[in-house]
Image (spheres, rainbow, N blue to C red):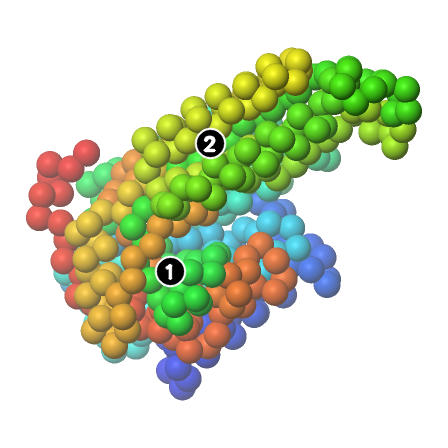
Amino acid sequence: MGAGTAFQHASLGEAIARRVHQLATISEEGDKLTRIYLTKELRAASDVLLGWMREAGMNAHLDPIGNVCGRYEGEQPGAPCLMLGSHYDTVRDAGKWDGPLGVITAIACVAELNRRGKRLQFAIEVVAFADEEGVRFASTLLGSRALAGTFDESVLGTRDRDGVSMRDALVTFGLDPDRIGTAARLRQELLAYLELHIEQGPVLENRNLPVGVVTAIAGATRLAARLTGMAGHAGTVPMALRRDALTGAAECIGAIEQFCRADESSLVGTVGDIQARPGATNVIPGEVSFTIDIRAPTDMHRKCAVADVVRQIEAIARRRHLALQLDVTHENRTAPCAPWLTDQIAQAIAAEGFPVFELPSGAGHDGMAMIDIADVGMIFVRCRGGISHHPDEHVELADADAGARVLLRVIENFRPREDRAGAR
């Protein structure tokens, strides 16, 4: 197939959707989409993406962490680039659009420029990040952290559920773990980083909008809580004398929900896992462990919320005579999108005839790592029902087309930040 021809005879949305569905056939499970980091399925997907990038007129290669990287030179070879990216790994039993939509749309935009023979004053690079989800080695953003030069080499010793270390998995994949450092890029090489992604929430759909401008990628704090009381016989211990760890946890969970609901901004709190022990029908639970995930658009807001939640949990534990252990297990700072980029995205959306709407991202994205070496901008595309990380995840053709047209317009009218030399 000649360069760019996949996108010549149909709308960008139709061609993008066709490739999203094609990529989704590469899975370790025949009836479910599962494509995990450093598996043979990820390798097969990387080969497909390399082929599509080359068809679109890019020089393409696999970097030492497994990112698929393509470069479309500008008018002058070697110029700094506008980088476009998203990820091509998935969660287990995933939807088709989370990650691949951004990668394939970026390739489609470059293919369209190449079809017209158009070169810009800057290069365009497209990166399909190899591990954003963190499913296999319980550490997210591995691909983008390597590119940003912030990869933690201690992760190489982490083992998956089958006992395979990341170091060994890299070698099996055909990569050299000792060369991961060479994947890192310098700030002066990038003009900016842009990512198109499904919203993974219902806000755009509720407003009947196909696209939106992301203002920030919310930071997240995760905690592990353990309440310890006293196990006892369900029939012989009076209610007033019980130290029931599960009812204590239930009160804590209710307090978290009530606190976050009362907040009028974008604060969200989730208890996603709970374990009661000893776990018998006729035994009062003596110990309960549960997780807490708190996210907000600003770090100050999130940290204040976490402090308030912790105080409430401590008070509940004291009143119920329960021992409490509470540990922070994960913390990501908020990644604000650069106003000069959000302005250009907003202008492109308006020029395509859509209302401009701004919203934060509650989900994490590779931009959280890329902000260490570049200003970040994001475009959200509506997804049906706000459903994500689920087989029902879906984007309508018209919305995929709208997102592609907006991204292409941003690229063609992109104006680099004037004070890049003085940037961080």
Using residue 87 as the reference point, say whether residue 291 is left or right of it: right
Q: Identity of the amino acid at label 1?
A: Phe
- Is there a contact, CB below 8 Å, between mark 2 and mark 1? no
Q: Which residue is mark 1?
A: 380
Spot occupied by residue 2 in the image (x, y as percentages of width and height): 40, 77
Q: Which mark is residue 302?
A: none
Quarter occupied by the N terminus: bottom left
Residue 422 visible in image: yes
Quarter occupied by the C terminus: top left
Q: Can you say whether 113 is above or below 145 in the image? A: below
- Disc 2 packing (10 Å; few <14; some 14–19; many ≥20): many
Give the distance between the C-alpha atoms of the residues marked 2 and 1, in whole angstroms.
23 Å
Spot occupied by residue 398 in the image (x, y as percentages of width and height): 42, 78
Q: Nearer the viewer, residue 391 or 404?
A: 391
Say which of marks 2 and 1 sits in front: 2
Residue 63 visible in image: no
Taking the view exactly as shown, the residue that stands out farthest to the left is 418
Residue 111 appears in which quarter of the rendering? bottom left
Q: Which residue is mark 2?
A: 221
Q: Residue at x 46, y 31 (%)?
A: 221
Q: Identity of the amino acid at label 2?
A: Thr
Using residue 396 as the reference point, say whether residue 11 is left or right of it: left
Q: Residue at x 24, y 45 (%)?
A: 375
Q: Can you say whether 50 is above or below 351 in the image? A: above
Using residue 420 as the reference point, say whether residue 266 is left or right of it: right
Spot occupied by residue 119 in the image (x, y as percentages of width and height): 20, 67
Spot occupied by residue 225 in the image (x, y as percentages of width and height): 60, 24
Query: Disc 2 or 1, which lies upstream in sequence?
Result: 2
Residue 32 appears in which quarter of the rendering? bottom right
Q: Name the element at disc 1.
A: strand
